[in-house]
Image (cartoon, rainbow, N blue to C red):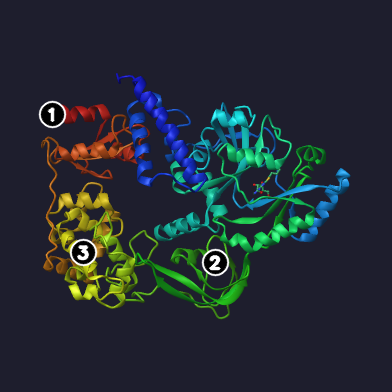
Amino acid sequence: MAKAASASLKKESENLCEKIRYHEYRYHVLDDPEISDAAFDRLMNRLKEIEAAYPELITPDSPSVRVGGTPREGFQTVRHARPMLSLDNAFSYEALRDWDRRVRETSGREDIEYIAEHKFDGLSISLQYEDGVLVRGVTRGDGTTGEDVTPNVKTVRSVPLRVESAALKKAKLPADFEVRGEIMMTRESFDALNRQQEQTGGKIFVNPRNAAAGAIRVLDPSITAQRRLDFFAYYLFVDGKVPFAKHSDSLQVLKQLRFRASDDWKLCDGIEKVTDYCTAWDSKREKLAYEIDGVVIKVNSTPLQNELGFTAKAPRWAIAYKYPARQETTVVNDIIVQVGRTGTLTPVAVLEPVQVGGVTVSRSTLHNMDEIDRLGLQIGDTVLIERAGEVIPHVLKVVKEGKPRKAFRMPKECPVCGSTIHKAEGEVAYRCVNAACPAKLKESLLHFAGRHAMNIDGLGEKIVDQLVEKGIVKDVADLYALKQDEVANLERMAEKSAQNLLDEIAASKKNPLSRLIFALGIQFVGERTGQLLAEHFSSLEDFAAAKTEDLENVPEVGPKVAASIVEFFSEAANRRIIKKLHDQGVRPTAEKRELKSQKLAGKSFVFTGGLANRSREEAGELVLQHGGKVSGSVSKKTDYVVVGTDPGSKYEKAKELGVSILSEGEFEKLIRLK
Ligand code: IVH
């Protein structure tokens, strides 16, 4: 039986929760962090450590839930306490004036105060709090019933998991209430997501709204957690009613309760002030971190709202003014290829220049070959483009085939350095893997010098730019041949700092092999894989010469990683770098793990599902310390599959192949007793 948590641990975890909540608020709601990311991680890690040892201390509002839980079978539908209606749209200022006239006529009043707010382009969500704690997050659905997406919503850092009772008291609110608002994705997160999808061949999202909606409506909350979503609150209910006399009061209270709410709303007496607001924001909206697709105008007074009431579909007291869509049609004159910093080839459409939302557009990214196939796009076609999260627009579809039209093919050679282009089996991206390709050289050098790689302090962007542009450094190995005067002659480089940099470079030769392997920037070889590879091979040369089978024998190295390593060293330019590094005296040797015993020698293990007493990584480490091997996939050669809770397909595979299956307890016995 596990020991019960002591009172002091309980207190510590409560304090940690409170601190983490505060720092999440500083970071994700106020955009004004007080502590470093590392300090934040330390708090979170300590909390997770305590919760792992004493699961009874995990509360439903613990900040640790934000990392995402286990996937679910399906969504439950939930009925909204009060329907989540949509809004009527106005596409012109004339339509706004008509609406204003109706409001005045229906209410019989002339002095109407409006409140104009951003119309956030996301996905509307209702958050229900009981006793100050978030208990449910529900999508709009059909307006009457929505889907329960609570675990997903909990991963959104700007959604408070608990609202302090002091804040509720100050606002004279009960502890049970509902907040509605919009789940959004910033342009930055959207661009980063599509860049990642480009590389991995995932679905390309047409705009941040789609990406946000997709991220909320997945059954696996850990995917939501990776998508960096935001929540903007705009509505507060208690028992299905608005608790304040004015909507502007609700917005202010929401901020006091530590919700993220926009400050950019404005009170307007008369519709002309509203149109001024719309015009002003049309030119400024580009600069916002997130997309707005219009302005929502509401009657500010709650009693007057109630008087005006609703039609079957929408409130009479509010309307959405929509900005014109940023879409246009144009002709694709050519498709060219750009080599990105990781060597990925990105096809780019050269467009007949066209104005979209006030900007002249002449290029559009096509992401990858799969996207071109999906669009059925050929050179000469007329396409519909949209400017969404990025300044560079996106092709939505082909609207007319060109006459003539010409199919596009990826080049066989890198347009920058001429080396052969690779495309791994089952992958979408075409890549130039030559580490010395000038298109990627600067980035490769910065990665090589990085803190977790060779840790060469002082080799920053400005220096790297000059070294590459002057042709002094053509690959990472050239760093070790740098001369004092070459460095001292660079701009903004004093003699002393030149010597410091050379000393740093020389000192980096002493780095362990794992760092050097990671520093080479091979696709899919991160720090941890670098470590595991370094424990397996005796030198860089040994590693560079490894065959696929040797590589797959390394724990956690599967076919994808092995293929990427083999591909990297199949490039002559990369083999030359290895030789040059050796000649320059960069010769780290193997890091053999200290073995506790040999009792698992020759035995290979695969772990699947959650373990109760340790993480899978820790269990794998135990196997290695006792001379065994760990693999990521089950094959006939696997000796044992250790099965935890909710095991994946590896469990099925093990049964199918008749591999011995162990529980965590049996695994522990094997290590201790054999
Ligand atoms: S108030 C009963 N305020 O736009 C009216 N909605 O087209 C409730 N939206 O379903 C909505 N920003 O998802 C309101 N500042 C804002 C909004 C907003 C975006 C969304 C919301 C609504 C849709 C209607």
**Marks 1 and 3, the one that precedes in the sequence:** 3
Which quadrant of the figure contains the N terminus?
top left
CB contact under 8 Å: marks 3 and 2: no
How many numbered marks does the figure carry? 3
Q: Is residue 441 visible?
A: no
Task: Please name the residue that numbered disc 3 is placed on.
Answer: 500
Task: Please name the residue that numbered disc 1 is placed on.
Answer: 674
**Marks 2 and 1, the one that precedes in the sequence:** 2
Which quadrant of the figure contains the C terminus?
top left
Q: Can you tell which of label 2 and label 1 is closer to the viewer?
A: 2
Type of amino acid at the residue the image marks with label 2? Pro
User: Does residue 23 appear to the left or right of 541 in the view shown?
Assistant: right
Q: Is residue 367 above or below residue 640?
A: below
Q: Could you say where residue 234 lies in the image, as x and y percent from the top left? A: 64, 43
Q: Can you tell which of label 3 and label 2 is closer to the viewer?
A: 3
Q: For the residue with label 1, is its CB less than 8 Å from the closest atom of ligand 1?
A: no
Q: Could you say where residue 177 lies in the image, as x and y percent from the top left? A: 62, 31
Type of amino acid at the residue the image marks with label 1? Lys
State which quadrant residue 659 falls in: top left
Q: Residue at x 30, y 33 (%)?
A: 643
Q: Residue furthest bottom?
A: 404
Task: Please name the residue that numbered disc 2 is placed on.
Answer: 393
Type of amino acid at the residue the image marks with label 3? Asn
The answer for how far apart the CA atoms under marks 1 and 3 are is 54 Å
The answer for how far apart the CA atoms under marks 2 and 1 are is 63 Å
User: Does residue 102 appear to the left or right of 476 in the view shown?
Assistant: right
Q: Is residue 277 above or below residue 163?
A: below
Label 1: how many Cα within 10 Å (few below 14, some 14–19, many 20+): few
